[in-house]
Image (cartoon, helix red, strand yellow):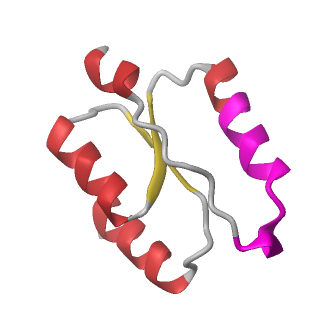
Amino acid sequence: MNGTELVQALAREYSMSQIVILTAFPDLLQVNKLFEFGALTVLRKPLDTAQFLECTSQILATPARSGKKLPRKNNVEAINAY
């Protein structure tokens, strides 16, 4: 199972999940697919700790039972940095 298939499976089985992907090889087409299939954001390795903490803080601040999903962030910085 690759990352895209994993995102699809998680989104299907756990529809309220906030999925964050960490990749060393961001590819624009692949990133777009990940967003389409349910990823909240895509972060690039090496991990920017501040960016990761901001992302996880927002996720943890959203009550799981609220039924709300955070808006997806088009992490263009991660894609363009590649």
Does residue 34 lie above or below 27 as drawn? below
Q: Is residue 61 magenta?
A: yes
What span is in magenta?
53-67
Residue 47 coordinates in the image, percent (x, y)? 54, 24
Does residue 58 lie above or below 51 as drawn? below
Q: Residue furthest top?
A: 81
Q: Is residue 2 visible?
A: no
Residue 12 coordinates in the image, percent (x, y)? 45, 82
Image side of residue 60 versus residue 31, left or right: right
Q: Is residue 33 visible?
A: yes
Q: Quadrant of the N terminus?
A: bottom left
Q: Residue at x 27, y 18 (%)?
A: 80
Q: Is residue 18 magenta?
A: no
Q: Quadrant of the C terminus?
A: top left
Q: Residue at x 72, y 49 (%)?
A: 59
Figure label count: 0
